[in-house]
Amino acid sequence: WTEEMVLPFEVVPIIDIPGYGSRSAELMCEKLKIKSYKDAEKLKTAKEEVYLKGFYEGILQIGPYKGKKVCDAKPLIRQEMIQEGNALPYYEPESVVMSRSGDECIVALTDQWYLPYGEENWANQVKSHINSSNFNAYSQAALDRFNFTLNWLKEWACTRLFGLGTQLPWDESWVIESLSDSTIYMAYYTVAHFIHGEGNLDGTANENLKPETFTDEVWDFIFLDKALADENSVETALFETLKKMKAEFEYWYPMDLRCSAKDLIPNHLTMALYNHVSVWNDKPHLWPRGYWCNGHILVDAEKMSKGKGNFLMLNESIERFSADATRFACANAGDSLLDANFEVSTANNAIILLTKEEEWIKSVLEAEKGQKLRLGETEFFMDKAFENEMCNLINKTESCYSKMMWREGLQTGFFEMQILRDIYRDWCVRTEIPMHRELILRFIEAQTVLLAPVCPHFCEFVWGNILGKENSVLLCGWPKAENADVWVTRAFSFLQKSIRNFRATLGKNKNVSKKGYILVATEYPQWKQEILKFMQSYPKLDDGSFPKDFTIALKDYGKDKNLTTSEQQKTMQFASFARGQYEMAGLSALDISLPFDQASVLEENIGYIASTLGLEGAEVHEVGSEGCPGSERAKQMAAPGNPVFVAQT
């Protein structure tokens, strides 16, 4: 073809996709800078991004099914075309099929046994389960893939004529293929130790339990809570063992969590759901409760390849970095369906970080022995802030771990904890006030427990060998933490942000400054006060949140006030900031003045501020107070939460 044959080409809007509009193909070509059909990888990325979104959220804009979601309209259109004789069902692989031996497979129609996945009632049971509160996919993207699979997965060829596997009970010339033969083996895990013996990993059987013992009737007794036809005919010892197996299964099931790869969603994982629903049809409380799926793994943002020299085996990684540093880098690699990125530098850095942490903990314990830590009440603001933020990070980390967000959990449970400790330690050094004994020891214990799921060996060593605890760190329980006081958090953030801003101001000063003063405003300017009052009075939803039409109402507010474009933009920005504070702290965030005393926070820490900025001293003044220094411009720049620093030579 030539350009003259197809250009100019006008895209015909058919489906409207939220966030992509009605011309998603055009949008993605511009976004990914796709120039031609030769950009195969970019085209593949564009298709993957748009297809799922379009299928589940896209709305048809034309035809008799206009206004319907694509996922609802597609089966109706399909059936209509088949009935009118304009189409017939046709199946083919979506891409080249390669065997594990590297050979290209040829698809052929042969005699075959099928499992009727997709049967309406069966599929609806699975759909209802995974979209209920009884199932956790841990991400919307994963849940979308399961729903997508349930919409296309139909009859599945479940047998083959050769290879390893279980013979089909009613036709032993066939062997059950592996994906169909491994969908409820999790149930077998619960009783395997009875059959193979405790701690036995070589597959040999317990001599007291013969294979012929485990008839369908016996398995129904263990797994389905069905009575044995004649319990009296079963040996007493065997019957007691079978009852223990039944109790063990009922204790462990349902399966709360299965960790697997995203490429098993279209087959094994969905089939496991189907088969659990089938086997335990009248016991939905035994169906799987959660799947967590991950992508593939990259090493330093590249696919592993022996040719590139970045191929890492597990044993090699442990020998090179240690088990805990490997786990640290894996946790930091990523939490989503996207490919995780194992960074060698992260693993190497973990060794240094953990070693430094061990040495620091030892130094604190030495200081405790030498009675160099402070006792008594936590009287300073920084003590209270340190404790408050510690509680905040403990709770955040617990939330992350419960959602299988290991990267985020490592961020809050280690990196942010380390930053918090360093700020507190720096404050103590600069103010010459010793660290508070109870607070710093609590930090050490909390940090050890928070890191234990990622680095268990290091944390076990610290817990037992350094801290002298008797029980394992894995048995000590999660650290107790009160809900953080949002205003202490905000005051602490205010102090840190102010210091950063003051440092930036000093950096712009050409003259060397020895002193300075800080201007604090206790009230917002009039235009901001009016916005806060408008937000206070605006009707909220039942859960207290602002409704979707709030942004529109805010624009109307600007029109009523005859605001210029620049003023309207400032209004929207301030309202967005205030809304974020409201969502975090509640109605008090919309008060005309801040609920904490800015001047007191700054004055109590003035020595720390001066030392941090390299000044001989600094003073705090409230704008509007008698004798407040500074130009009118500097005073006008000050706002609640944003003090202004004026340098003096």
Image (spheres, rainbow, N blue to C red):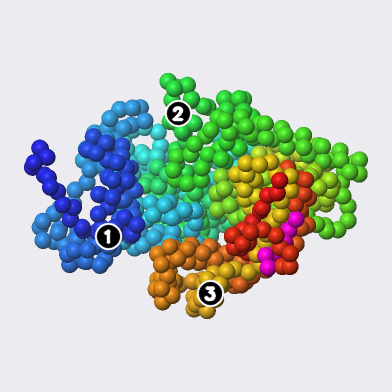
Q: Of 6 and 517, which appears nearest the observer? A: 517
Q: Is 440 situated left or right of 30 in this image?
A: right
Q: Which mark is residue 304?
A: 2
Secondary structure, mark 1, is strand
Secondary structure, mark 3, is helix
Mark 1 Cα-neighbour bin, 10 Å: few <14, some 14–19, many ≥20? many
Q: Mark 1 belongs to which amino acid? A: Asp
Residue 620 in magenta stretch: yes
Label 3 or label 2, whichever comes before in sequence order: 2
Quadrant housing the N terminus: top left
Residue plotted at (20% across, 57% down): 13
Q: Mark 1 points at which residue?
A: 16
Q: Where is residue 20 in the image (x, y as percent from the top left)?
A: 31, 55
Per the rendered image, the range of residues in magenta is 619-624
Mark 3 vs mark 2: in front: 3
Mark 3 Cα-neighbour bin, 10 Å: few <14, some 14–19, many ≥20? few
> Real-space Cα distance between discs 3 and 2?
58 Å
Residue plotted at (14% across, 48% down): 9
Give yes or no for contact between labels 3 and 2 (Cβ–Cβ under 8 Å): no
Residue plotted at (34% across, 54% down): 53
Mark 1 vs mark 3: in front: 3
Q: Mark 3 belongs to which amino acid? A: Glu
Q: Of 57 and 9, which appears nearest the observer? A: 9
Secondary structure, mark 2, is loop
Q: Which mark is residue 163?
A: none
Q: Mark 2 belongs to which amino acid? A: Met
Farthest left residue in view: 5
Is there any visible trace of residue 259 in the rendered image? no
Q: Which mark is residue 530?
A: 3
Give yes or no for contact between labels 1 and 3 (Cβ–Cβ under 8 Å): no
Task: Tell me: residue 577, above or below residue 190.
Answer: below
